[in-house]
Amino acid sequence: MTISLFSGQGSQYQGMGKDILDAMPELSVIFDTGSEILGKDLRKICFDADDSELSRTVNAQPAIMSVSILCLEAAKAKGFRFDGVAGHSLGEYAAMYASGMVSLEDAFRLIKARSEAMEEATTLSKGAMAAIMKIAPEQVEEVCAAAKEYAAAVNYNSPVQTVVAGTPEGIAEVSEVFAGMKARVIPLNVAGAFHSKLMQPAADKFYETAKTITFNAPDCKYYSNVTGGELTDFSDMASLLAKHIVSPVRFTSELAAMHNAGADRFVEFGPGKTLTGLVKKTLKDVSALNIENLAGLEGADIYG
């Protein structure tokens, strides 16, 4: 059973996807569609923007999604097939497209609304995030619950990697505690406290767009960050996606659910190989690889 995985925010880099698009110009429709809906040149953002411009939420999210879709479509053109999809945070939007749940146009309408709402929310309340390594998620939750300032576990990435988000004061407070517990603390270069209650204004604003979108039942298994397992009820995706903005990413639970269902091959599409690394750290007896450039596309043993 093969699962397609899709990259999350923070994986972006200048020039991502360019060699694949140069080799397969017929896939330009992805960037043409995105540019029209976004009202800005998506190629310029992906290929030419400097790190500071590309890392802005309003640019990073549609850029990563477009490159993830590009990499997937390039692999499909070579014969790649899959049985299920999952994404990490914004990666769920490429996953929805890949599963047939939304059209390419609606995927860009959704990510435009999401990225704009989330960037605006970061200006309303300051937030911070940090990755906590080498201690169990339960210990991370206990420390956050005991903190005087707001901090919460928001990304369950692996049995020994949990990301926390909160106010700058809250993250500083818990980071000191984690350091005392001999955990490795890595502050993240992000603009806000994503997947925490501080994103509620973004969730509310995004919902107004999401409820206008037509969502189809997917044509493959679809795994959800919010539930941590396979999603089977698609009756109110607008509410679920709004909730997604303020809910933890339960990626470790998703991996377990996929593995239990028989998944033994994971292919990550889009910039970076973070999810490939998480699969390898979490599951045994599976294969995992990433496709983000032409060399990876042509060298992957996943076709036919």
Image (tube, rainbow, N blue to C red):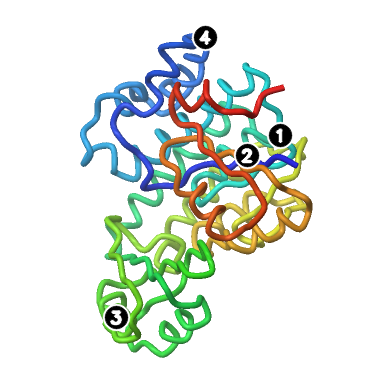
Q: CA distance from mark 4 to mark 2?
A: 22 Å
Residue pointed to by mark 3: 179
Residue pointed to by mark 2: 4
Q: Are marks 3 and 4 in contact (CB under 8 Å)?
A: no
- For badge 2, the amino acid type reads Ser
Using a 10 Å C-alpha cutoff, classify the residue at mark 4 as few (fewer than 14 neighbours), some (14 to 19) or many (20 or more).
Answer: few
Q: CA distance from mark 3 to mark 2?
A: 35 Å
For marks 1 and 4, the one nearer the N-term is 4
Q: CA distance from mark 1 to mark 2?
A: 7 Å
Residue shown at the point (57%, 47%) measured from the top left: 87
Mark whose residue sits in front, 1 or 4: 1
- For badge 1, the amino acid type reads Phe
Task: Check residue 26 in the rendering and tell me which mark sits there, or answer none.
Answer: 4
- For badge 3, the amino acid type reads Ala
Task: Between residue 234 and residue 11, name the one nearer to us.
Answer: 11
- For badge 4, the amino acid type reads Glu
Residue 213 place in picture, x, y as percent = 62, 38
Residue pointed to by mark 1: 82
For marks 4 and 2, the one nearer the N-term is 2
Q: Are marks 3 and 2 in contact (CB under 8 Å)?
A: no
Q: Are marks 1 and 2 in contact (CB under 8 Å)?
A: yes
* 196 vs 109: above or below: below
